[in-house]
Image: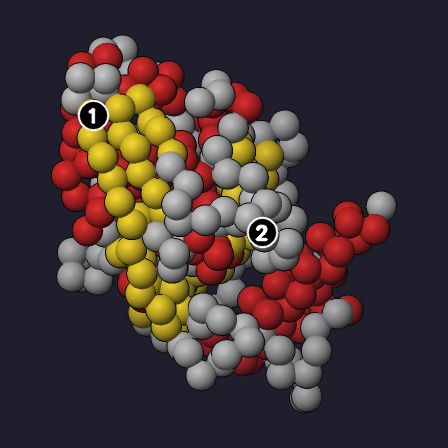
Amino acid sequence: MDKPAHLTVVKSNKVVEASYMLTLAEQRVLLACIAQIDAKQELTENYRFEITASGVADLAGLDSLSNAYRDLKKAAEKLYERSVIIDDPDPDNPQITQRKTRWISSIDYVPGEGKLVLSFSVGIVPYLSQLSREFTKYKLKHVARFESVYSIRLYELLVQWSSAGEREIEVEWLKKQFQVEDKYDRLSNLKSRVIDPAVEEINRHSNLWVKYGQRKSGRTVTHFQFQFGLKDQPPAPERNRLTEDEINKQARPGESRAAVIARLTGTSLSEMAKPGETFEQALERKRVLAEAKKKLR
């Protein structure tokens, strides 16, 4: 396996936004395998990936090789049983609203060599290879030192929208995709156990800076609002977060929600927001347009 600095992770956005739970050891193993894939080439479920304890140690910066052996053994015990739930998996067949598949189809642990040998399942392969559109790409080294699985997940969700520099995520959707619906009923616990540690690790170890606020619908916090960017670029000016009451009060006749937010926050989206379009939809369209322009250069 190449050094972490040279490895790139490429995933379909469907997987980035999928619902699943993996341990940190399992995440590291899968990411190390995914980083070996040429996302533009065909991958079959018969292809065998090898991950060694020394490779995991290099990847995560572990001081003790025994810890890397431990992580490999732990990953081997449960990784075959892990599944992922992908929403709207097939654009050509909209009747399929959800797909559940295993990550891998087979796994072998070779204790004498401190090595795992595994193959991805046929259900996940299309989201890892021959990707020509709607994918997220980042250097493996930027998540290698994370100690929380939530840091990796949040980092991917932010990188997916890197051209926008901000992303609003519904609280209940995030809990469902991270599979923590039954763990953190109180928002304060979700923030202290999931969001705050993830933001701290992203700021400390990755190539991104990130900060977040929250949006209420009535008296209930319904969304997290993230602002982020590359560390070698200055943060965008702080702007006030708008409540639903403020948006409704300031709306002009016939004006869409996206246009109201854009006008009040001073963003350029006010010029491109379409009637009835949400702020999130306008941001997504802006991101897609920006990526299209890059490809034409």
Report the front residue among 55 and 282: 55
Image mark count: 2
Residue 110 image label: 1
Report the front residue among 31 and 21: 31
Q: Secondary structure at mark 2?
A: loop
* Residue 174 horizontal/vertical position (percent): 35, 59
Residue under the image location 65 percent in, 49 percent down: 163
Residue under the image location 29 percent in, 55 percent down: 102
Location of the N terminus (image quadrant): top left
Disc 2 packing (10 Å; few <14; some 14–19; many ≥20): some
Tell me where residue 114 sits by quadrant. top left
Furthest-bottom residue in this view: 253
| Separation of residues labelled 2 and 1 (CA atoms) | 30 Å
Residue under the image location 26 percent in, 45 percent down: 106
Q: Is residue 26 above or below residue 183?
A: above
Q: Is residue 130 visible?
A: yes
Q: Is residue 161 above or below residue 222?
A: above
Question: Is 271 situated left or right of 101 in this image?
Answer: right
Disc number lying in front (2 or 1): 1
* Residue 119 horizontal/vertical position (percent): 34, 43
Residue 130 image label: 2
